[in-house]
Image (cartoon, coloured by chain):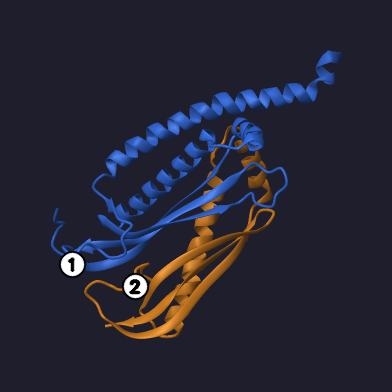
Amino acid sequence: MSDILVSNIEVVPGRRVKTHLGLVQGSTVRAKHAGKDILAGLKNIVGGELKAYTELMQEAREEATDRMIKQAVSIGANGVLNVRYATTAVTMGAAEILAYGTAVVLE
Amino acid sequence: MEIFFEYFQLILFLFLLAVGFFVGRFLESQHYVSIRKREKALKKILAFATRYPPNLVDAQECRLVTGAVVISSDYFKQFVASLRNLVGGRFRGYESLFDRARREAIIRMKEDARRAGYSLIVNVKFETTSLSAGRQGAMPSFEILAFGTAIRPQRGMIG
């Protein structure tokens, strides 16, 4: 997937956008593992980073980004610009992660 | 022994409060030591909130970099926060929590950039999401994400 350019600025320095292909997006909903949730509950007493959740969110974000890139590739883009992320806690212990951006063809 | 069972809940509460206070405090200071150390090590990686790279830099490559952290409050801070809610005002305990998390996210983003061989990040944005929202009585925990576009200058950085 490294041949596709992903960035959160609107222009790529030194390259020209040939065609705009519109919005592409990818999202995933992830739930917390019950066992990890209990461990995190214990970690909550002393506070600090919840590593299991950090990993979970990171994996979910990669998945969302991959889906966005797949969509971009499928419509013939070679770059996704102005990428943004949005995260929403859906219910108890589940979160939706959305990645979206503008698919473009770069020269 | 009877007294112990009678006041079990109170004793448990005080125990958790004490653990939260002492261990939480210790972990926080440890975290700050590690943050300062890594921030120093990453001094060469520059991050800008501006949208475009400085004019002096002619980029040849760019890539999205991210850094994220999920952090939670401790038992003591949560208790103090619930008292603080009654009177309002600033609450230092949570301020330091957010500060730690933001700096950690920035550090991870910069590490991501360094791993891929970049030394400049532009258009840095933050996203904050509460993971405990809507959960009755849940310990406040939230995710902080920092992301930006890492670029590689064509002929070395100037200035």
Element class at badge 2: loop
Numbered circle sitting on residue B58? 1
The kind of residue tagged 1 is Asp
| B90 on left or right of A82 | right
| A102 on left or right of A107 | right
**Picture coordinates of residue B42, whole percent (x, y):** 29, 45
**Picture coordinates of residue B114, whole percent (x, y):** 29, 53
**Discs 1 and 2 carry the same chain letter:** no
**Picture coordinates of residue B100, whole percent (x, y):** 45, 40
Could you tell me which chain the residue with mark 1 belongs to?
B
- Residue on which the image places disc 2: A10
Tell me what residue is drawn at x 48 percent, y 37 percent.
B96
Tint of chain A: orange
Tell me what residue is drawn at x 38 percent, y 31 percent.
B33
Question: How many angstroms separate mark 1 from mark 2 (CA)?
Answer: 16 Å
| A44 on left or right of A71 | right
Q: Nearer the viewer, residue B79 or B44?
A: B79
For label 1, count other residues whose C-alpha is less than 10 Å away and answer few (under 14), some (14-19) or many (20+).
some
Could you tell me which chain the residue with mark 2 belongs to?
A
Q: Which chain is blue?
A: B
